[in-house]
Each structure stands twice: as C-alpha cells, then as structure tokens.
Amino acid sequence: MTASRRTGTSLNRRPSVSEPSLTPEARRRADRARRLRRGLPGLALVAPAAIVYAVFVLTPLGATIQYSFYEWDGITQATWIGFDNYARLFTDEELFGSILNAFQLILYFSLVPVTLGLIAAALIRKFGTSRLALVSRTVLFLPQVIPLVAAGIMWTWLMATDGAVNQFFRLIGLGDVTRAWLGDFDTALPAVGVIGAWVSLGLCMLLLLAGMTKIDPALYEAVRLDGAGPVREFMAVTFPAVRQELGVAITITVISALRSFDIIYISTQGGPGNSTLVPGLEIYYLAFLQREIGQASALAVALTVLVLAVVLPLHRLARGKEES
Amino acid sequence: MKTSARELWLGRGLLVFVMFITIIPFVSLFVTALHEPGTYPAGLEWPEDPHWENFGNAFQAANMAALLKSSFLIELGVVPAAVLIATLAGFALGHLKVPFRRTLFIIFVLGLTLPFEGIIVPLYYQIRGYGLLNTQWAIILPLLGLFMPFAVMWMRAHFVNMPQDLSEAARVDGASTWQLFWRVHVPLSMPAISSLAILLFLWTWNQFLLAIVLVDDPTKRTMAGALGAFQGQWGTDIPMLCAGSLLILTPTLLVFLAFQRQFVAALLQGAVKG
C-alpha cells in the first residue's frame, strides 16, 4: 500500500494471482472475456466522464489540428494549405513575437513569485501557527480567489498616470520615473508581469510553506549545532525538502504565463503596438476578429505543444526527486 | 528551536510587507469607488464626501441581479454534475479493475495541462452547431468536459488510497458495485469531494474566455465574463468602474471568507495534484 501510494502510474498493477503457467489458449481467452464482463460496471462508471471529455475536449482538439492545415475564414470553403500556417508562426513577426512575449512573461509570472515566495516562506516558517501566520494565510489567498479580470482592472487603475503607483513614486521623490506603465512600450510587459506576480505570490508562498512545515525540526537543530548560519541552513535543509513543492509552484506559474489571457485582455489588449501580445490573445484576435481560423488553430496547436513541452520535463523532475 | 530575534523580526516585517502589497489594490479599488462619478481621482486618497450611492448605481448599471442569477445557474449546471461524474470515474479508475484503465488514465492525464485557448476555436463552431451560442449551456457543457481531466485525476488519487479490504468486506456482505460506491465510498470521501466542489465552483465563477467567446449577452455569462463587459462599458468612468468591480468581486470574497479553511486547503492540494 505505501509503496503503491508513492508511484503515481503503476498503482493499478496488481500481480495476477492463481494463473497456472500451462493455461491453454482457449482458457486464456475465456479468462479475458470473463474479466471484461466483470469490468463492465467499472467501464459504465467511467463512461459519463469519458463522453463529456471526448465530446468537448478531444473532438475540438482534433478539429484544431485539422483546421490548422487549412486557410479558412469560417464562412466560405476552406482550402488545404499544408504546413503554411505553421511556417508563418516562425516568419511572421507578430505571431513569433507573441510567443517570445509569453516566454518573457515566464520571468515575471513564475520566477519572481517563486523566488519571493521561497524567501518569504523560509523566513515565515518560524511562526508556525501564530495569529500572524493565520491572518496572512487568508490575506495572501485573496488574489487567487478573485477573477483575473478583476486583478487586471485593479492594477490598470493602480498603474495609470494618476494611479497609486505613480503617487507613491512622487511621494518618495522619484517623480521622473512616473508614466502610464501599461501604455509605455518599454514598461508594458513588465507591468503586466507585476499583475501576474501579484496574483500568484500568495499561492507560491503558502505552497512552499506547506512543504517546509513537514521538515523535522531536529534537522534544523543539527545544522545549527554544526554552526551553520541562516543561508547554509536554507541550502542544506529547507531547499532539498521543498524541491517537490518548488516543482509544483514553477509548473503552475509557468503554465499560467504561457496561457495568460484574462489579465492582458483587460489591461493592455496586447498593446501598445504588439508589446504585450501573447499567444492566447492572438488566437482570440485571429479567430474572432480577423477570421483567420486556420492561422489561429496553428497557433493554438503550437501553444498546446509548448505548454506540454515545458510541463512534462518539470513534472518528471518533481516526480523523480520525490521517488529517489 | 533557537532562532535569533533578528530573523524573527525580519520574517514578521516581510510577512506584513507582503500582506500590505496584497491588500493595496483592494484598498485602492474601494477608495476610488467612493469618488464622484466621472472624475479622475488621484491614486490613494479618501474623498472629502464619499459617494456611497456609487455602489447602488453600479448595482443597477451592471445589472447585478441578472448577473448573480446567471452565474448561479451556470454553477448549478457545472458543479454538481462535474463532481458526480468525476467521482464515478475516479472511483472506477482508482479502485476497481476496469479494463483499459491504463489507457483511460493516460488519456485523462493528457488533458491536464491543455490550455483552453487551444480548443476555443472549434468549440465555438461546435456550440454554434448545437444552436447553443449565447445561452448558459454554451458555458456549462464545455466546462464539464474541460474540468474532467483534473476532476477525475483528483478523485482517482483519493480512491487509490482507500483500502481494498473495505470493499472486500462490503462485497462479502453482498454489496453490488453501485451499493459499494454509494453506501461505503461516497460517505467516506466527503472531504475530497467537497474540496473538489470548492475548486470547481471558483474556476467556473472566474471563467472568462469561454464566457466572452460563446456568450454575447453579459447577463448570461459568468461573473468574470460580465466584469469584462462592464469594463468595456464603463472603462472611462473610473469611480463607477471600481464600484462595479468591487460589487462583482464581493460574492467570491464572501464565499471565500465563509469557507476559508477549506478554500486554502483545496487550493494548495489542487496545486499539488494538478
């Protein structure tokens, strides 16, 4: 039981009991039929979930792949154009730029909150169940609970020319740096990144904190007795213990960076120019405003592959560490 | 455990600072909502005479009564059904010997990280084909499918850890699979089921992309979708926009504060399992 709990996928492998090694072919076939019959109630239980999943996810996924090979405006006859839509992903500056922007956003949506979350959690670990820790749990979750659209609206106003961010800069005598953060070519992408970082900082921190509370305090005693300072203590005890949580935090924030849509749709619509255009938004524009269904679908396929390509290695990393 | 006072204070200070950063946008939203409609307030500043009536006006302007009704209809269509069918499937895949279970498992896992943007285009044509565009069904049905990978994996992970002896004992007593499920396993699984329900409730409420693509009428959308439309309409009247945003936020905040313990636990677990 404990062994199977650890290894995610091999759980269902139970050794088959009482199967004589000299089973004749006929008997084996009868056996299989019997097992299938006995499995039927189980299959029936899976069926509703499998059907809605097949109809509303797998079918459209197949259709996306199919559309991606056509030039189609959604109304007239579609024409087969092979891989042209995919080729354009690399040659068209706007399309390729949206993918590059998504990768830049990883820096803000993932690296920033995970790093800050790690530092904060390491310092906070010491409070255990104090009132401060409990209150902060509630407060830090607020951004996770509200719609991303609301986060976008709040921050759009905060970072506007007359918003609180500029007010703060003027207050501390940095009046020169004030600007419309989301409307400036140089700062729009980082500004959008700040919104994303704000949204996930709390989750990252509490996730890592949860990992840290599982650490045996005796380990800390031991390294402290060895004369380690806070930094060595962190590297030797805390960091190895939260590797899995770290993997999870990185995975979910990277996914949210790659498929960011809500925040950007609300705060910048991809502008100024295309400086904050991301694949999710570009898919929406291409399909529903420019009526280039094929091109939108090719980008959708690319985005899906990209997410998988980033997530699978991360997932394996976290898993592998967990098992070793 | 020995920790230096300096570290403790550093930790406290940092925690307070992070909380402050988290809260500021909410405070700014609230303060701005109290200014005179149509004005351009200067950042964080308490107005000389607070316009509390802004909230009432925003309630009217956003058509909040209709919005709430629509959002709850969508929740009602998504959450109970999704939880039920995911629990059935999770039970079968995690606890019974279902034929092809490995294949089924892998197929569900594949959907776990699928971005909604990846299938939104065909979904539009599919829903249009069913004649369901601009109805709540246009959001309910796709969400049922889109939530399945996570929901099934979540319930499966729970049922994998349920002892087989329990089921064997029930079988010896003559329970059918169905009875085993309803009488033995569902009552024992309520914590996992309610956490899942909380997560799905939240994700449905906050669903934006499906709402703006598949439903034109903001009063038939989810809360997040309606908020998007509200911003489009009142984007230039900052106090009004802030008041409306705050109103649309409030239901989630209330639900969160009421169930915060379960919410935090569900979100943390959801992150780990997702």
Image (tube, coloured by chain):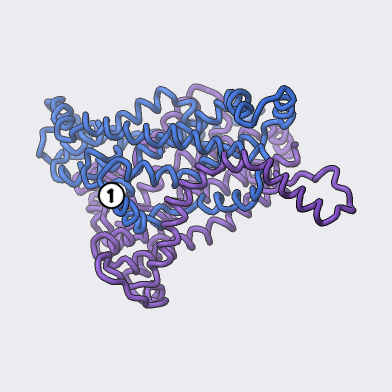
Chain colours: A purple, B blue
Q: Give the quarter of the image for residue B21.
A: top left
Is residue B9 something one can see in this rendering? no
Is residue B226 something one can see in this rendering? yes
Three-letter code, disc 1 = Gly
Residue drawn at (32%, 31%) of the image: B72
Chain for disc number 1: B
The residue closer to the viewer here, A261 or A24, is: A24
Residue A211 image position (x, y, % from top left): 60, 38
Residue A178 image position (x, y, % from top left): 24, 51
Q: Is residue B162 above or below residue A25?
A: above
Q: Secondary structure at mark 1?
A: loop
Residue A121 image position (x, y, % from top left): 54, 38
Q: Give the quarter of the image for residue A105.
A: bottom left
Residue drawn at (25%, 46%) of the image: B134
Q: Give the quarter of the image for residue B78.
A: top left
Task: Tell me the residue that label 1 is attached to.
Answer: B131
Image check: A99 left or right of A166? right
Residue drawn at (23%, 53%) of the image: A179
Image check: A124 left or right of B203? right
Which image quarter holds the N terminus of chain B?
top right
The residue closer to the viewer here, A20 or A104, is: A20
The residue closer to the viewer here, A180 or B2, is: A180
Mark 1 residue crowding within 10 angstroms, few (<14) / some (14–19) / many (20+):
few
Total numbered labels placed on residues in the image: 1
Image check: B190 left or right of A236? left
The residue closer to the viewer here, A37 or A278, is: A37
Residue B73 image position (x, y, % from top left): 32, 33
Q: Is residue B62 above or below residue A296?
A: above
Residue drawn at (31%, 69%) of the image: A94
